[in-house]
Image: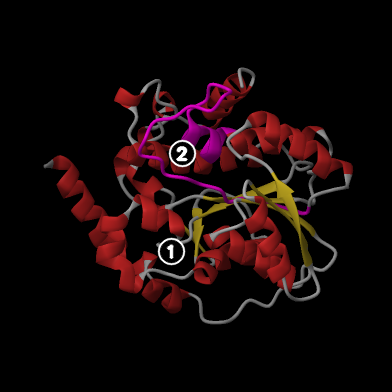
């Protein structure tokens, strides 16, 4: 009963602003941006919002290194790029830390990264571990972001001129960060909805940590795209899609804020970005009681050494 009441409160509060209607009310003008000469890295770039970000950046002149696992989809994405920029395929399993470290080395060897977009995200209802011993959704949604970011920093590919944009989700509004819930130890304790919300809340705290590293470090922003009709929604949330399908955003609408942040680079600080505007990162008081940025960073650093 408590979960039902909580869900009703959540949807009543966010259904309008997260919908396509909310996007059209808040975003009044097309994005004018010039990314010529910039080098981007976009994870999870072959579908949905990531694909729209990659194509949108390339159309405005960027060279986009698109990271994903499916080789055929990567090359199809590269062929679809239009405009002065281009898309280069980087085949990598984003749930494997060794793959991410290898990819980071190759990327850094080619030069600095202007924009890093941590876009990849999955909601997995079935429990599974990678061959590195990491629960797969945690590996994909959070630990991989930490490892890729750290490897690029250590190799000198990210510096004070670089921008980091993380794709969170409105689902984080229902979670107070609990480190022990980031990675389930077995199938009996795994909850795909809970894990996803925790990972997305953690992205907010991780952004704070990155912005605490000083003026020579990259600037970081965290955003969420509203409710977007992606393949992930279709497979993981069919009931939700059945109810809200007519007002879900398309991928370009979901990608808009990421492209805008990369172009404008507004002052960093607390909050989460939606439709080119900074919103509060807490909608309910209980979510303020979770773990903080330093504790999360220490925990991820320790976990990364074992993967």
Q: Residue at x 32, y 68 (%)?
A: 245
Residue 297 at what x, y percent from top left? 58, 28
* Left or right: 15 in relation to 219: left
Q: CA distance from mark 1 to mark 2?
A: 18 Å
Magenta extent: 114-143
Residue 84 at what x, y percent from top left? 81, 74
Does the magenta segment cover residue 122?
yes
Q: Secondary structure at mark 1?
A: loop
Q: Quadrant of residue 57?
A: bottom right
> Which residue is denoted by mark 1 in the rendering?
228
Which residue ends up furthest to the bottom in the rendered image? 29
Q: Quadrant of the C terminus?
A: top right
* Left or right: 63 in relation to 295: right
Q: Residue at x 16, y 47 (%)?
A: 4
Would you place residue 126 above or below residue 132 in this image? below
Q: Residue at x 62, y 32 (%)?
A: 96
Q: Quadrant of residue 178?
A: top left
């Amino acid at each position: 009963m408590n979960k039902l009441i909580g869900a009703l409160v959540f949807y009543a509060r966010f259904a309008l602003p997260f919908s396509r209607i909310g996007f059209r009310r808040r975003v009044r003008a097309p994005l004018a941006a010039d990314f010529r000469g910039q080098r981007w890295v976009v994870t999870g770039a072959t579908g949905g919002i990531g694909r729209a970000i990659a194509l949108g950046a390339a159309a405005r002149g960027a060279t986009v290194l698109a990271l994903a696992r499916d080789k055929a989809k990567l090359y199809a994405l590269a062929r679809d790029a239009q405009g002065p920029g281009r898309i280069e395929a980087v085949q990598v399993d984003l749930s494997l830390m060794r793959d991410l470290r290898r990819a980071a080395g190759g990327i850094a060897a080619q030069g600095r990264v202007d924009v890093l977009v941590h876009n990849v995200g999955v909601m997995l209802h079935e429990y599974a571990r990678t061959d590195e011993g990491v629960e797969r959704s945690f590996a994909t949604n959070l630990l991989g972001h930490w490892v890729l970011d750290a490897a690029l920093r250590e190799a000198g590919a990210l510096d004070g001129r670089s921008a980091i944009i993380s794709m969170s989700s409105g689902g984080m509004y229902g979670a107070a960060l609990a480190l022990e819930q980031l990675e389930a130890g077995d199938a009996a304790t795994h909850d795909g909805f809970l894990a996803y919300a925790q990972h997305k809340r953690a992205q907010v705290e991780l952004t704070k940590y990155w912005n605490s590293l000083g003026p020579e470090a990259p600037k970081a922003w965290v955003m969420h795209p509203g409710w977007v009709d992606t393949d992930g929604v279709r497979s993981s949330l069919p009931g939700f899609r059945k109810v809200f399908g007519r007002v879900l955003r398309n991928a370009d609408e979901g990608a808009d804020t990421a492209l805008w942040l990369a172009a404008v680079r507004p002052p960093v600080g607390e909050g989460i970005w939606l439709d080119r505007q900074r919103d509060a990162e807490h909608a309910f008081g209980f979510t303020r009681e979770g773990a903080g940025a330093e504790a999360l960073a220490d925990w991820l650093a320790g976990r990364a050494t074992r993967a």
